[in-house]
Image (cartoon, grey):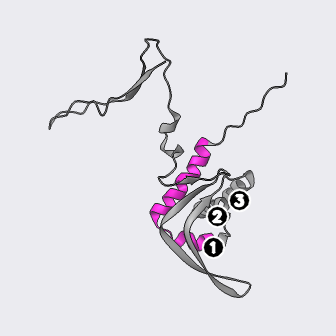
């Protein structure tokens, strides 16, 4: 069955100054004349979209490149080291991760969520988060929203 997509915004007439714009929507039309039930496009939800440049890894995690890399100095076992962050790899969270996030004060939930999802030490993530720019924080948040909005569909077959 052939389908034609019509973007009414692109095909809309030019609006002259002082005229009110006409509200438009996109439509999917079946060309064979068979009426099609309305199709709800769940991909239109911006929370379900990964940021541009995000890479979905084989294990389902998502790697984003920081637009401004961050270098931290950390101390562990008496040794000072430099850690350079150019990317963040975010993983789907478990129930334990969600409980940990819900167990902290509201102002710490975002940074705790990032620490749990990136599997990074909380103290390191606190320092990293404080040095990240807003754009990179928003990209990481968009990945977390994608995980929560889309989720993987798990099905089981009925035995029979």
Q: Does residue 128 sit above or below 18 in this rendering?
A: below
Magenta part of the chain: 125-150
Q: Residue furthest bottom?
A: 78
Query: In terms of secondary structure, where does tag 1 sit?
Result: helix
Task: Please state which of the two labelled residues, at mark 3 or mark 1, is closer to the viewer.
Answer: 1
Q: Which residue is mark 3?
A: 100
Reading the chain from its start, which is encountered first: label 3 or label 2?
3
Q: Residues within 10 Å of mark 3 (few under 14, many from 20)?
A: some
- In what quadrant of the picture does the C terminus appear? top right
| Residue 103 percent coordinates (x, y) | 69, 59
- Tell me how many marks there are: 3
| Residue 45 in sight in this render | yes
Reading the chain from its start, which is encountered first: label 1 or label 2?
2
Marks 2 and 1: in contact by CB < 8 Å? yes
Q: Please give the label number shown on residue 115.
A: 2
139 or 3, which is in the foreground? 3
Quarter location, residue 16 = top left
| Residue 106 in sight in this render | no
Q: Residue at x 72, y 55 (%)?
A: 99
Q: Please give the label number shown on residue 124.
A: 1
Query: In terms of secondary structure, where does tag 3 sit?
Result: helix
């Amino acid at each position: 069955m052939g389908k034609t997509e019509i973007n009414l915004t692109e095909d809309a007439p030019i609006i002259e100054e002082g005229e009110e714009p006409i509200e438009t929507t996109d439509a999917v039309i079946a060309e064979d004349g068979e009426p099609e039930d309305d199709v709800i496009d769940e991909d239109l939800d911006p929370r379900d979209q990964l940021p541009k440049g995000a890479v979905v890894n084989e294990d389902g995690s998502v790697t984003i490149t920081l637009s401004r890399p961050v270098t931290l100095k950390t101390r562990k076992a008496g040794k000072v080291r430099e850690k350079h962050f150019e990317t963040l790899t975010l993983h789907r969270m478990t129930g334990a991760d969600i409980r940990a996030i819900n167990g902290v004060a509201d102002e710490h939930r975002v940074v705790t969520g990032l620490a749990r999802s990136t599997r990074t030490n909380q103290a390191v993530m606190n320092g990293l988060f404080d040095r990240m720019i807003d754009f990179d924080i928003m990209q990481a948040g968009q990945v977390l929203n994608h995980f929560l909005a889309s989720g993987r569909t798990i099905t089981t077959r009925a035995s029979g």
